[in-house]
Image: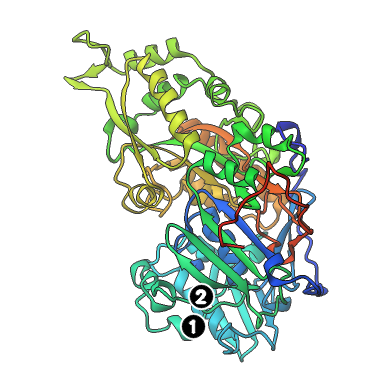
Amino acid sequence: MARVGLEALTAGPASWRRRVVAGLALALAAGCGAPAAERSVVIAVSSDVGILLPAAELTTLDAAIGNLLYLGLNSARWNDGAIEYRADEMSLADSWTPESDSTVLVYHLKPDAVWSDGVPITARDVVFSYELIRAPGVASRYASFWAELDSVVARGQHDVAFHFRRPHPRMLLHSGLSIMPAHIFEGTPANTDALAGHRSLSAPDARPVVSGPFLVRERRPGERLVLEPNRRSVAGRPWLERVVFRVQPDPATRVIALESGRVDVIDPVPLARAGELAAAPDIRVETTGLRYYEYIAWNGRRFAPFREPTVRRALSLAIDRPGVLAGLGIEEFASPAAGPATPLFPELIDPAVRPDPFLPDSARALLRAAGWRDSDGDDVLDRDGVPFQFVLVTQADNERRRAAAEIIQAQLAAIGVATRLRALERNALLDLVYNRKDFEAALVGWGVTLEPDYLADQFWPADAQYNITGYRSVALDSLVPRARSARTDEEARPRWRAVGVQIARDRPYAFLWFYTEAVALRERVQNVRIDVYGVYQNLHRWRLEPAAPATTSRQTTGDGER
């Protein structure tokens, strides 16, 4: 059983360290002797994957599965509190070298790398992929990689040069995008709808052309995604012959499926039930670390009072964060947030900036000073004849967020602020919040990039794709470029800390809490690496021990997916 709880989660790195590991690692041997039926794993997930294309991915699950299908030039892992960039079986390049004044990074592609359709992978694919992510119609989460990039240039078939505007600490991150096949998508309009509608991704029998250790065998949207080995991948052949991601939004159903043996993994575990599952003799629970946070985004473009810093501060003071966590039963797995800087990087956190305390009387006083009164005795504040009421949207298939929204609704009502809750299916919510930005307030979550740049990408500039509230700060207009201009981590660290402090003070969101995701696995699932870098990072190396003889209480008829 894995140790769970905050004591196992809050240790962060003393500094950012970059260790580039040159030497190639050998791909894991496929093993022998086990029939294909015994090499199948079923994973129950809470929501479906989106577009199976790195340029258009949005969610953590999109990225995790995308990394299994599409390799990047380098690979990365979390090692001793830092990102370690590598050339190994999960990278398309076998090495890279700096040139000039360290503003040029040249990758040398593996000459035997091919796509799953047999077409060679070349520098042309790399150039195409980087041009695609900066197309405005794609609105890629990776478009910010171009902030310090000047050009990406093919040098023959197997060398590609990244020309940066200056040396900076995240050159390996920004050159590590998962690469997409140019021969498949060239000629397709560079917008999300056209890419999603491409036959290789959308047809009933779609088999995306990929480079990673797995390829798609079957996809039934809203039901399941089935992967099988990509025998042409330079990553080598996985031990598993079949991986089924089954969509099961209801958390109780996921738990029952795991306990009965119908699935091998559930991701995520309802945090309130993690301790119970960890106590089971044939189940273990592993956690990812405090990489994720939940927040309420105040969209001043749709609800004018949210434009006022005093109002945003008052609303934050009305929320009892420890009380909500206790009410949800997840205080072991979450920590109140003071701002957007994750506890994984304590050097980004100013100790003087603390989570907003629960001070409802102070919240009422701030709103009163801002002109809000209950002039008609209906227990709802109003100003200039307009009541203080808004719609708070959240995710329908996320039980924790729905419950948190209900608790916070009651806490805001206690200071005279009325909210109407609206729960939406995940994809509809993502479209409303991140694409259309047509909401008043949203209780949603974010998984931070394991580099400090995320402090800018989500909050700056005002028209950035993921600045969902339109938050604008004159201070950030100088702080962010200064942080990005740092040549070393040591120089960047205090600058990014200043960015985080400014965002925390401005409160474009009510920062609620950082939390870990928990994953439950049957003990027979072995050789698994789960940490802040993800759950499926080494899925190609997972193995299954022989199943123990079934007992009467555990016996099942199966579901046909093994």
Residue bearing mark 2: 129
Q: Is residue 42 visible?
A: yes
Image height check: is 219 above or below 529?
A: below
Check contact, mark 2 vs mark 1: CB within 8 A: yes
- Indicate the quadrant containing the N terminus: top left, top right, bottom left or bottom right: top right
How far separated are the C-alphas under marks 2 and 1? 7 Å
Residue bearing mark 1: 182
- Indicate the quadrant containing the C terminus: top left, top right, bottom left or bottom right: bottom right
Secondary structure under tag 2 reads: helix
Q: Which quarter of the picture shows residue 340?
A: top right
Q: Residue at x 48, y 48 (%)?
A: 458
Q: What type is the residue that disc 1 sits on? A: Ala
Most extreme residue toward the bottom is 156
Image height check: is 540 above or below 259?
A: below
Given residues 20 and 171, the one toward you in this image is 20
Residue 515 position within the rendered picture, expressed as x and y whole percent measured from the top left: 60, 37
Secondary structure under tag 1 reads: helix
Image height check: is 295 above or below 13?
A: above
Q: Which quarter of the picture shows residue 11?
A: top right
Q: Residue at x 38, y 16 (%)?
A: 366
Q: What type is the residue that disc 2 sits on? A: Ser
Give the crowd class for mark 1: few <14, some 14-19, many >=20 residues within 10 Å.
some
